[in-house]
Image (tube, rainbow, N blue to C red):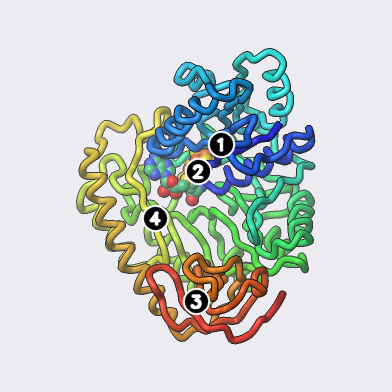
Amino acid sequence: MKVYIETYGCQMNVADSELVMSILGKEQHTAAASIDEADVIIFNTCSVRQHAEDRVLGRISAEMTRKRQKPHMKIGVIGCMAQRLGDKLHQMNKGIDFVVGVDQYQQLPAIIYGLEQKEDFVTATAVNHNETYNNLYPVHTGDFNAFVTIMRGCNNFCSYCIVPYTRGRERSRPVEEILQEVREVGEKGFRDVTLLGQNVNSYHYRDVDFPELLRRVNEISSIRRIRFVTSHPKDLSDNLISTMASCEKVCEHAHIAMQSGDNAILKRMNRGYTFEHFLDIAAKLRKAMPGFALTTDIIAGFPGETEEQFMATYHAMEAIEFDYAFTFKYSPRTGTKAAAFTDQVPEAVRLERLQRLIELQQDITLRKYQEQTGTIKEIYVEKVSKKSDKEVAGKSRDFKITVFPGTSDLIGKFVKVRIVDAVGWTLKGEMIEVVDG
Ligand code: SAH
Ligand code: SF4
Ligand code: F3S
């Protein structure tokens, strides 16, 4: 069967879709080149905000037209919504053929086979806190960057967040499995790896913690760049900072969610750190690694947030000057602690606060990008620029898209570039020399 997976949500889901393709590939299923060719369409879904769920439900309904024209076609839902809603998804849309939760992907080939035989709706959403999908090699689909899952689940229970309910308890993959996968992706030509987990700082397998894992990945010769997402501020140790600084392949960039700049809100969010702690780690990271880029997530309008508390976040963003911030309007998630708080902020206020944060960050990002003029960066060239075939584009170690005059023979190479300008959120450069590739 030809399978098409449409992926929503975070990088963990992108990595899981690659894992699912590998599981299905073992049973001779292949990836459909486009949705038009698919015998099976799988939606890998996200529950983090209501909007994410609504969007995918809309997409599933839209695909029912195709199913009516191609009666043998199957439509399945996997990922966080499948885990959260199970059978309810089928009640919401009778055209859905299967719902498979995040720990049950190994069952997918048998489920698809069963549907081919008898066409009954199937659901498999049992939780298995030990499942780490060992001995499976995901079909990496990125061009140059490979996502490698190092842990699954989350134990933090931030009061607004659905992830600990959909993804279950934290579990780390065996260190040898991870190193083996990184070696394999390196040999296949991916020189940039991103280690994935909801809180990579709490990685722990036997005597190996996250800094030690980074040191071991750093020794793999085929890899040139290492990134990781996401780190939790409460677990970001001095040992990790010094390891990042001493491992030459670990890039000068981290995504660390601040969520709020107000201590009472952080406490109610159950984040386990203060704003002062966050400031301290931001300063330490920037001191340890010159040119360090910091990106973050922020929630506007968490229950009980006063205008004053919101302004604390606003001023925190002004003071820290993140290179980029993903800003979200608080979305109540059924079953989480914060959804039951009685002092919910009205929707219009949430929206208006979000708007102010977006505008503030736009100015900061533009300024930060313009400040890069005159610096020299190493770019991993990924493609010919969309705007001109005489230019190529790639990413710097500090995760900024950079475009410069060049031709397609540079794709896949590392090039030293002088930054001459910034246009919006893209850096413009001039090539100095090819350094590797
Ligand atoms: N594990 C990651 C976060 C994963 S979810 C971490 O802790 O860094 C990605 C982001 O979605 C979160 O950082 C948060 O800013 C946002 N988010 C999570 N739940 C939300 C909700 N209920 N409403 C709005 N934003 C939310
Ligand atoms: Fe959600 Fe908090 Fe876990 Fe991140 S650390 S996934 S925000 S509960
Ligand atoms: Fe969404 Fe699940 Fe990731 S809820 S953010 S896809 S872990």
Precedes in sequence: disc 4 or disc 2: 2
Q: Secondary structure at mark 4?
A: loop
Precedes in sequence: disc 4 or disc 3: 4
Precedes in sequence: disc 3 or disc 1: 1
- Cα–Cα gap, marks 1 and 4: 35 Å
- From the viewer's perspective, is 433 left or right of 367? right
| Residue 17 pos. (x, y %) | 63, 41
Q: Secondary structure at mark 1?
A: strand
Q: Secondary structure at mark 2?
A: loop
Q: Which residue is mark 1?
A: 44
> Which of the 4 image quarters holds residue 412?
bottom right
Q: Which residue is mark 4?
A: 274
- Cα–Cα gap, marks 3 and 2: 29 Å
Q: Are marks 2 and 1 in contact (CB under 8 Å)?
A: yes
Q: Which residue is mark 2?
A: 9
- Residue type, mark 3 in image: Gly
Tell whether circle 2 marks a residue whose Cβ is less than 8 angstroms from ligand 3: yes
Tell whether circle 1 marks a residue whose Cβ is less than 8 angstroms from ligand 3: yes
Identified at 43% across, 38% down, the residue is 52
- Residue type, mark 2 in image: Gly
Precedes in sequence: disc 3 or disc 2: 2
Identified at 61% across, 25% down, the residue is 73
